[in-house]
Image (tube, rainbow, N blue to C red):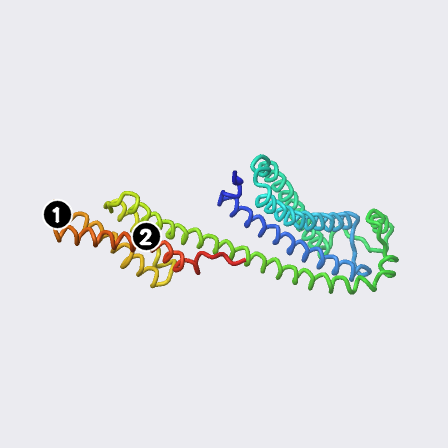
Amino acid sequence: MASIEHNNADWEEMRIRVDSIASAVFLIGGGALSLSMSVVISNFENLTISMGMVSDISSAWLSLFGAIGLALFMKIYMVFQSFLLQEKTKFMDNNYNIFNIGGWVVGGLSFILFCIGFYLTVFFGINLISEGNIIPITSPQAKAALVVVDYSVEKYNQQTYWVEYIPALVLPFIAILGLYIAYSQWRTNQNKLKLELFRMRFMIYEACTDFIRNIMKGGVVTDQILLDFLASTKEAKWLFNSEIASYLENDLYKNGVDLQCFRSELEGVGVGEKRSTNLNNQAAIKKWLLSQFKVLDDKFERYLRIKH
């Protein structure tokens, strides 16, 4: 049994949207984290901050770091879920609700931490440029607050060498990762478009083979068979080249109409040359129709063959 979620286009669309949100959280959160750390640490000796501000920026960094980690885990989780949908369909049929709930929990926590971290970062910046309730970094109160995050001016002086280089390396890394994620998203959308085109084209191919099969099964061409064929292939000119559209209308459909006309003309015709000629014409059309299965395969192959 095919997986319920795998066959549901709504779930597929939702997974694409969730992946986009996870990518945005990863990129924006990573940029905010690296930029705020570089600004605060690089200017550590010159800042005047209160104990509350130290707590705010520490919580902001931890929240953003947690949001980035959960966003990355979410993307890995979605890849693993897609693998199970393809390889373990029966297992996913029985457990897809659990997997989806888990995804919602991880994604929700990531977004909540991102909002908290971003808010605290902005709040810290506003307090930093304000004039109320701030104290020098060298004061006993500030040093006591720094003990909470296990940091000090002395540590800053000892670690200047990596403080200067890490922010410069983090931002290009995030930019490159962002380009890769954007490219992956583009590839996903392209594959989705190809799959949708394949489905629409294959429906027209099936309509053609069903048209021939229905005629050969009953030996007659009814108005309903002709109408169903026209309705099912009306989009062919938009999905294929003019050669296929012309073939469906001027060859396949026309021979079906001719066969129906010959069948109608045969009614009331007695034994004789006219009847024999009519039956020969019907036989020739039916023989031609039978040969069209191979012709259809050849004409549709370039549009239906999936390249990996």
Q: Nearer the viewer, residue 42 or 282?
A: 282
Q: Residue at x 67, y 58 (%)?
A: 31
* Residue of label 1: 271
* Image depth: mark 1 or mark 2 in front: 1
**Residue 111 place in picture, x, y as percent:** 63, 46
Question: Given contact means CB atoms under 8 Å apart, are the residues at marks 1 and 2 in contact?
Answer: no
Query: Which quarter of the figure has residue 182?
Result: bottom right
Residue 153 is left or right of residue 10, and the answer is right
Residue 127: percent from left, percent from top: 71, 53
Residue at disc 2, secondary structure:
helix
Query: Which image quadrant: the C terminus?
Result: bottom right
- Real-space Cα separation, disc 1 to disc 2, in angstroms: 27 Å
- Place of residue 32 in the rendered image (x, y in percent of width and height, measured from the top left): 68, 56
10 Å crowding of disc 1: few (<14), some (14-19), many (20+): few
User: Closer to the camera, 118 or 187?
Assistant: 187
Amino acid of disc 1: Val
Q: Assign a secondary structure to mark 1.
A: loop
What's the residue at 27%, 52% (across, down)? 286
Q: Extreme top residue here?
A: 94
What residue lies at 33% left-to-right and 50% top-to-bottom? 232
Which numbered disc, 1 or 2, marks the residue that appears first in the sequence?
Answer: 1
Front residue of this view, candidates 284 and 48: 284
Residue corresponding to mark 2 = 290
Horizontally, residue 69 falls left or right of residue 273, namely right
Residue 246 in percent (x, y) is at 30, 61
Kind of residue indicated by mark 2: Leu
